[in-house]
Amino acid sequence: MNVNEAIIRRRSVRQYQDRPVEPQLLQKLLEVMPYYMSPANLQPLKFLAVSDPEVCRRVFPALKWAAYLPGYTITREQEPQAYIVILGDKSVCKEFQFAAGSATTALSLAAYELGLDSCCLASADRNALYPLLGIDPEEMELLYVISLGYGAHGGRTVPMEDSCRYYLEGQDFVVPKRRLEDIVRFDRWDNG
Ligand SMILES: Cc1cc2nc3c(=O)[nH]c(=O)nc-3n(C[C@H](O)[C@H](O)[C@H](O)COP(=O)(O)O)c2cc1C
């Protein structure tokens, strides 16, 4: 798979097979992490990999899944098999959003290339996660949690009409994407 295919085909996955992520695969995924883009090359992020089944089991209830689909639930067996928690190191700088977006993109594409599915989660009960994961919020800001595993549902995109809300078709997520002609111009925005 080339990078363009991965960008187009990767979808957020919120339900997983009952199959662990092999430790070597997780290690391989983490090895891409030094290479994300960051302003002034400050590289202010740290990456906490969580794969212990008991810790994973306790992380899951702190996450908010699929806000557009109230009542969406999965079984214990369908929960993520691992997580990578993206942390902002406050001793490096105070503003992490660009670096976090860049690292999240690199991570989810690298995971996809390795055959893993993922979902980036911003909605999380940080008060629960800081002590559970041994993070001192004075030192580190918990930015995103990336869930990982082998996907158990499909996903596809459709041209966006009037709503950006994803929806279910059976088990599959259908994700509206804005049309190319609505978001891209050459040379001048008004084409005048
Ligand atoms: C920064 C960020 C935060 C997100 N937070 C959540 C979240 O808290 N819960 C969730 O279910 N999905 C979350 N998502 C996933 C988005 O809903 C998903 O990327 C979007 O619907 C587009 O779908 P796609 O990733 O399949 O293209 C987040 C994505 C990003 C980039």
Image (spheres, rainbow, N blue to C red):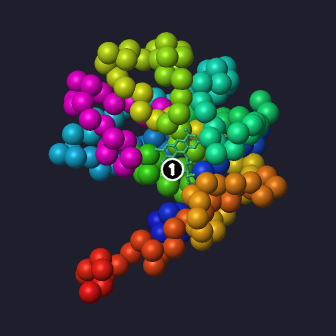
Circle 1: element type: helix
| Outermost right residue | 170
Q: Does the segment drawn in magenta span residue 81?
A: no
Q: Position of residue 182 (x, y in %)?
A: 45, 74
- Rendered residue at 52%/20% (across/down): 129
Q: Position of residue 127 (x, y in %)?
A: 49, 17
- Residue at numbered disc 1: 108
Residue 150 seen in the current view = no
Q: Amino acid at mark 1?
A: Ser
Quadrant housing the C terminus: bottom left
Q: Is residue 188 left or right of residue 80?
A: left
Q: Position of residue 20 (x, y in %)?
A: 69, 37
Residue 30 seen in the current view = yes
- Rendered residue at 23%/24% (across/down): 91
Say if 110 sits above or below 5 in the image. above
Q: Position of residue 96 (x, y in %)?
A: 31, 37
Q: Does the numbered disc 1 mark a residue whose Cβ is under 8 Å from ligand 1?
A: yes
- Rendered residue at 58%/38% (across/down): 147
Relative depth, front residue between 116 and 127? 127
- Rendered residue at 38%/15% (across/down): 136
Say if 159 sits above or below 60 in the image. below
| Outermost bottom residue | 192
Relative depth, front residue between 178 and 46? 178
Q: Where are the magenta residues, as a range?
A: 84-102
